[in-house]
Image (spheres, helix red, strand yellow):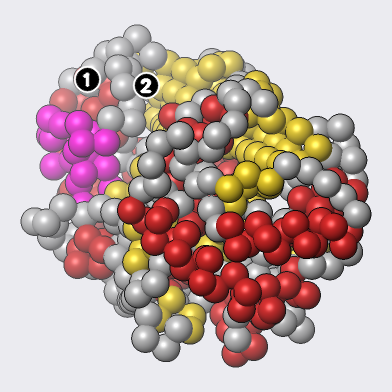
């Protein structure tokens, strides 16, 4: 990922912070349960994380650090990593407001200034998993994890990626090729996103010494509502096809 | 040996009735002098899925006329070919005699194979039992039959292709025609096929002590032709995955 991709994503997230995440972060921090993705699927329905008490956890692309906060409240020793200063600023305000302090590090997921083998769980929820070059950030996750540690990340599915038009809500037709998927610039005003085929996700994880343990393809619940900000994720679509998925992999 | 499941009985009737037509239509296409995979007959030498089979005990689950097992026997493997259709196995016997090779053929459903535990180094199929029998029954069988460290590899239709197949035109379309969640048994008038979501395939491997090593999504060349897919569908298969080949290792 070139410097300009990172700079562009920081610009996009600075804008999103002003438009949306700055305000919504307080609601997310206030939630008692852990929820996954745009349709807020409860962790108790998917059971991906397990008991995090006492674990060293790094969240790659933590944004306003609500997910990190949920884990910190459950006894994890969390470090949040994000490249966008405005997002970290929001996170710091909320840490003070909720009286829940943990380290925040300003860095992209491709180059994290933290020591080797110092975490039990590396996590990304639409963070590094979406916005960083997979070869680089998965290599970083592998480096940061202790042997036996886990990498858990949520992102958009490859199927949804090929069903999104250049602009607007997800469709029921295939809009772009699956083979060769990698770097996406959806529009000049949006950031740079990454997506791979399922074969290449598995290949990338294996290459970085991960054993793939689970792939949870999330189904929107019957009462799912359209997300107020990420509105291109159509809940009716996501009831029939997976819009988001969670990978869980173990470092050898 | 347990009785055939209802879908295995239906598929046996279907394959016994259509084996002659099938071999007439596809036999030459899939009976080439070197191992090739699937709809587009992509060479094993490019995909490197099975590796060196010399000296290995190899089980083919859904061998049809044993085109694959014959080639593996010629490369030093000790194959066993299993098929649910006796008529297919008659074609296999003729092909083996013509090739001058001999190995055991077993007439059974892969859902309950009358073979010893831990007796194979490789269990594989190319559009065989994993699409034509219930994966929830075949996966534990494959795991049981493999030795520790053994390889399970099989090709089948990709889950994305299963979504995009148009049931009325019989053609692939760039559109989602079927729901994904809960995908399992796909019936048509004469036979029953099976498919699972990607995540469910992974769960099934791990539940049966199989570590996933690789997922290969073969992509045909622009000039590829097949006796299975219409020439008009090559363009679909160039853009989206028509097939999956899974590779997993028994712990």
Instruction: Name the subunit of mark 2.
Output: A
Q: Which residues are magenta?
A: A27-46
Taking the magenta stretch, the answer to whether it contains residue B198 is no
Q: Is residue B238 left or right of residue B71?
A: left
Please give the name of the residue rendered at 13% of the width and 35% of the height, measured from the top-left corner.
A31
Q: Residues within 10 Å of mark 2 (few under 14, many from 20)?
A: many
Camera-nearest residue between B2 and A200? B2
Is residue A84 visible to us here? no
For the N terminus of chain B, give its image quadrant.
top left
Camera-nearest residue between A226 and A240? A240
- Residue A74, position as x, y percentages in the image: 23, 18
- Residue B101, position as x, y percentages in the image: 87, 50
Q: Which mark is on residue A38?
A: none
Please give the name of the residue rendered at 35% of the width and 75% of the height, measured from the top-left corner.
B189
- Residue A165, position as x, y percentages in the image: 40, 78
Residue behind mark 1? A73
Taking the magenta stretch, the answer to whether it contains residue A41 is yes
For the C terminus of chain B, give its image quadrant.
top right
Q: Is residue A14 left or right of residue B145?
A: left
Secondary structure state at the residue bearing disc 1: helix
Residue behind mark 2? A78
Q: CA distance from mark 1 to mark 2?
A: 10 Å
Residues marked 1 and 2 touching at CB (< 8 Å): no
Instruction: Name the subunit of mark 1.
Output: A
């Amino acid at each position: 990922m070139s410097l300009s991709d990172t700079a562009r994503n920081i610009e996009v997230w600075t804008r999103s912070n002003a438009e949306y995440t700055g305000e919504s972060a307080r609601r997310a921090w206030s939630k008692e349960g852990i929820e996954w993705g745009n349709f807020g699927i409860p962790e108790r329905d998917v059971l991906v994380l397990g008991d995090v008490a006492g674990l060293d956890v790094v969240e790659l692309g933590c944004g306003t650090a609500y997910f990190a906060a949920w884990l910190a409240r459950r006894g994890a020793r969390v470090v949040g990593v994000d490249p966008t200063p405005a997002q970290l600023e929001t996170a710091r305000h909320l840490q003070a407001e909720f009286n829940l302090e943990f380290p925040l590090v300003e860095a992209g997921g491709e180059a994290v200034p933290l020591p080797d083998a110092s975490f039990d769980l590396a996590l990304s929820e639409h963070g590094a998993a979406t916005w960083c070059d997979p070869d680089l950030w998965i290599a970083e996750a592998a480096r940061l994890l202790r042997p036996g540690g886990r990498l858990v990340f949520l992102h958009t599915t490859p199927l949804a990626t090929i069903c999104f038009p250049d602009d607007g809500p997800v469709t029921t037709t295939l809009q772009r090729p699956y083979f060769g998927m990698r770097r996406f610039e959806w529009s000049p005003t949006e950031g740079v996103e990454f997506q791979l085929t399922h074969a290449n996700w598995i290949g990338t994880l294996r290459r970085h010494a991960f054993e793939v343990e689970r792939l949870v393809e999330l189904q929107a619940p019957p009462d799912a509502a359209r997300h107020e900000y990420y509105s291109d994720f159509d809940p009716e679509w996501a009831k029939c096809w997976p819009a988001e998925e969670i990978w869980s992999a173990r470092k050898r | 040996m347990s009785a055939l499941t209802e879908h295995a009985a239906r598929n046996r009737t279907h394959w016994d009735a259509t084996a002659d037509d099938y071999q007439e239509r596809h036999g030459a296409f899939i009976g080439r002098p070197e191992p090739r995979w699937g709809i587009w007959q992509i060479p094993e030498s490019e995909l490197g899925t099975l590796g060196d089979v010399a000296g290995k005990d190899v089980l083919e689950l859904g061998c049809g006329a044993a085109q694959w097992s014959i080639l593996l026997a010629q490369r030093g493997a000790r194959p066993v070919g299993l098929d649910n259709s006796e008529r297919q196995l008659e074609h296999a016997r003729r092909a083996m005699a013509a090739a001058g090779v001999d190995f055991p053929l077993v007439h059974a459903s892969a859902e309950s194979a009358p073979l010893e535990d831990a007796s194979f180094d490789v269990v594989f199929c190319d559009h065989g039992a994993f699409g034509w029998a219930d994966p929830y029954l075949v996966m534990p069988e494959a795991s049981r039959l493999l030795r520790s460290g053994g390889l399970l590899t099989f090709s089948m239709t990709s889950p994305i292709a299963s979504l995009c197949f148009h049931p009325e035109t019989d053609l692939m379309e760039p559109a989602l025609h079927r729901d994904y969640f809960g995908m399992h048994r796909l019936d048509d008038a004469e036979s029953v096929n099976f498919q699972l979501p990607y995540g469910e395939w992974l769960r099934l491997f791990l539940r049966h002590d199989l570590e996933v090593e690789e997922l290969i999504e073969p992509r045909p060349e622009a000039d590829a032709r097949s006796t299975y897919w219409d020439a008009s569908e090559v363009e679909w298969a160039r853009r989206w995955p028509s097939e999956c080949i899974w590779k997993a290792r028994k712990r």
